[in-house]
Image (spheres, helix red, strand yellow):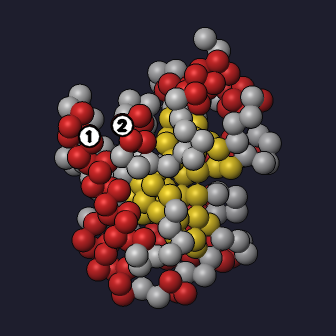
Amino acid sequence: MTIAEKLKKVKETIPSNVQLIAVSKTYSADVVYEAYKVGQRLFGENRPQEIVEKYAKLPKNIKWHMIGSLQTNKVKHIAPFVEMIHSVDSQKLLDVIQKEAAKNNRSIDVLFEIFIAEEDSKHGWDFYDLMELVKTWKLSDYPNVCFRGVMGMSTFTDNQTQVKREFSLLQNYYNNLHKLIPTFDTISMGMSGDYKLAIECGSNMVRIGSSIFGER
Ligand SMILES: *Cc1c(COP(=O)(O)O)cnc(C)c1O
């Protein structure tokens, strides 16, 4: 199947209220362009270097989402154009995003990455720590950041009950944070292997790579 055909097939399984981020990490700009040609505009990348290179090569109406863990010293490279950063996992990172967005005279959308899995390899806030912090912030301290919602990754397992429990937890965390942050509207959860379950549990943004572009 071509990329266009695979993209179409994936889209048929996603309700219209759910946004599809095509995760193009490790694939070339030419491959991204195949998906662009058939209308895909949202792409996700997990390395700053790679997202900068593809941004330079590809049409400027693509919306680039940073989905991988991000070092504070790399924010300046993506701040001029990145649409959304899904992987905000520390106050320090948030402060740097605010600073760099202001320098570029723009606003950057962010999601809080929250830890929901059993694996140590996954990143993110402890939800209760994050709640305590948010209560101490004035949202006006972040005039160039738009707080859009949460992102999470489930444990890599065949146990559907467990994955469902983790996704439901993230939905619950979202609801609690939304009470403090009125601009929230996004729950980014679900990848190729688990996005259907994620959508059942309330996801409205899925990050899908291998089902569209093939195994990496
Ligand atoms: C790679 C990646 C994805 C996509 O994973 P697939 O299994 O290829 O769909 C989603 N989210 C994050 C954070 C990723 O790094």
Q: Nearer the viewer, residue 206 or 34?
A: 206
At x 26%, y 48%, the residue is 166
At x 52%, y 29%, the residue is 13
Residue 23 lies, with reference to residue 140, above or below; the image says above
Where is mark 1, residue-wise?
A: 163
The numbered mark, 2 or 1, whose residue comes first in the sequence reads 1
Residue 37 lies, with reference to residue 2, above or below; the image says below
Picture coordinates of residue 206, whole percent (x, y): 49, 42
Picture coordinates of residue 121, whole percent (x, y): 27, 46
Q: Which of 53 and 89 is in front in this view?
A: 89
Q: Nearer the viewer, mark 2 or mark 1?
A: 2
Would residue 13 be seen by someone viewing this image from the given angle?
Answer: yes
Residue sticking out furthest to the top: 1
Q: Nearer the viewer, residue 126 or 69?
A: 126
Picture coordinates of residue 143, whole percent (x, y): 60, 81
The answer to which image quadrant residue 101 occupies is bottom right
Would residue 91 be seen by someone viewing this image from the given angle?
Answer: no
Question: In the rendered structure, which amino acid carries the disc numbered 2?
Answer: Leu
